[in-house]
Image: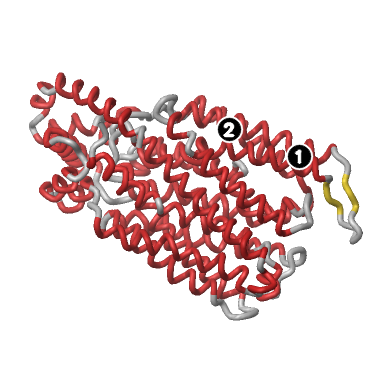
Amino acid sequence: MVNSKKIYNWYIALVAAMCMVLYGYDASVFNAAQGSDNWHEWFDLDGKNDAYLIGLVNTAYTIGAIISGFFFGGPVADRFGRRWGMGLGCFITVIATFIQAFAPRHNIGAFIGGRVLIGIGQGLALTAGPIYIGEVSLPEVRGRVMTFWQTFYSVGSFLAYWIAYAGNIYKKRLGHWDWRLVVIFQILVPLIIMVLLPFQPESPRWWIKRHNNIDEAKKALRRIRDTEQEVEDEILSIREAIEYENETLGGGSYKPLFTDPSIRKRLGLAFVINVGQQLSGQGTLNSYSSAIYKKIWTSSQTINLINALNATFGILFTLNALWTADRFGRRWLLIVGAIGMAVCMLIVPIVGLKTPDVIAADGSATKTQPVGIAIVFLLFLFIFFYKPSWGATVWMWTSEVFSMNVRAQAVGMCSQSQNVANTVFQQFFPIFLAKEGLKCLFFFFATNVLLAIFVFFFVPETKQVSLEEMDALFGGQNHVEKGGQILGISDARRSEATDSEKNTTVHRENSRDISSV
């Protein structure tokens, strides 16, 4: 049966997962805002002549996020705790939202500055959030819990696009508030997270790693584990792993990321799949779908409705990872997802290029409604494949493969490598789209084929492997065993082998119970 502790364990993980709403909302808010004529008028921007500047507005966020994720996210989460990392990131996001919403007329610089600050805040939150989830969740359900990390990205998009759609309907009455409403609602979820975080436990792994405070670590675990034996076993595994890392590898620094062959291998793999996540096409489509749809429809209300429906279905599609991630594994999801996305990105430009254009009264060329519906269906099918795989699973895999001594630094760097890819690619994508039209989607077809091949040959399966024993999977030392030898308790652990097998069975039963929550 599902008990209160299991429900509470899910609850605290989901509060951390809500940090992803910030990312999903911001990734969509600019796409929604640039669909408003009032936004262009307020900042004196022209969609055709100022394509480079509009690209800069979009990438300003990623610049802040890269700086924060690479250099501040890990140290803040390690020094002050995972909760502080999330809370501080949310606070900065709230301040930056007001800067954007009330940027002076004709002052695009203030708007860009607000987006840089939001990037800094989210770089902190998006580093600490997945680490916290991984460190408080049982291995058997870690994949399912991390599914909600990506689900909340879709929730953020859902909120942004539906608010934009409502604002577009009443844009004459709202005036410049049609885009301000979309921006200002970005404070909603960060405020909720800031209120809830102080009332949930800090990561037990952080208590031991940072302060060697076993008592506080046990208090935290007792709130989320069923039995005292489970608490003692987990504390012992954490102590052993951290003892080995402190003695041999050094903790809380960036050096092991480049000197330890096993960690270096994981860092390289994580960089590739995180960059691949953005070059798959979803990141660009999420930011520039309005520009793509304008080649099909002239009505901004229709485009806003399609974006809102896209975000709505994105939530449902992401939940497919709940029953696939821990059943079929991370590799299966990544390969199937990449192949499905490749097929969609092959068919969409073919449909667009091989069907006739309709010339409007103003001389602009659009597509017939049946062709437009076909293209939208294919782009929805694209997110059906993307959301549970390269959306949810990339974050899942990245948050669970690194050892405690480098986890915060590595997750921060790898997650922000997504923004490195975005900064480079999205800066010139508007020009790419303007010159090549739908033919630019062939690039995403080729990228997804390469990603499927890469995962098949290089990415190992990580489902249901405990965080403390992940290193052995990548050719490194088993930190639990080595730490036990240092602490002089390896014999005791060997005598508990039978009990460990029983605990594994219990954990699997628990995971089946949790799946009904």
Task: Note whether residue 292 is visible.
Answer: yes
**Among the 4 quarters of the image, the one containing residue 441:** top right
User: Tag 1: Cα neighbours inside 10 Å, few (<14), some, or many (≥20)?
Assistant: some
Task: Note whether residue 471 is visible.
Answer: no
Rendered position, 296 above or below 353: below
- In front of the other: 485 or 63: 63
Q: Position of residue 247 (x, y in %)?
A: 18, 42
Quadrant where the C terminus sits is top left
Report the side of 480 relative to 380 (left or right): left
Say which element carries label 2. helix
Rendered position, 210 above or below 227: below
User: Tag 2: Cα neighbours inside 10 Å, few (<14), some, or many (≥20)?
Assistant: many
Disc 1 residue type? Pro
- In front of the other: 198 or 485: 198
- In front of the other: 428 or 137: 137
Report the side of 349 relative to 214 (left or right): right
For marks 1 and 2, the one nearer the N-term is 2
Q: Position of residue 103 (x, y in %)?
A: 56, 77
Disc 2: which residue:
338
Q: Residue at x 21, y 46 (%)?
A: 204
Q: Residue at x 51, y 70 (%)?
A: 114
Q: Position of residue 66 (x, y in %)?
A: 47, 57
Disc 2 residue type? Ala
Disc 1: which residue:
349
Report the side of 342 relative to 140 (left or right): right
**Among the 4 quarters of the image, the one containing residue 373:** top right
Rendered position, 320 above or below 155: above
The reply to whether callout 1 and callout 2 are in contact (CB within 8 Å) is: no
* Mark number, residue 319: none
Q: Position of residue 438 (x, y in %)?
A: 76, 45
Q: Residue at x 30, y 30 (%)?
A: 513
Q: Residue at x 73, y 55 (%)?
A: 431
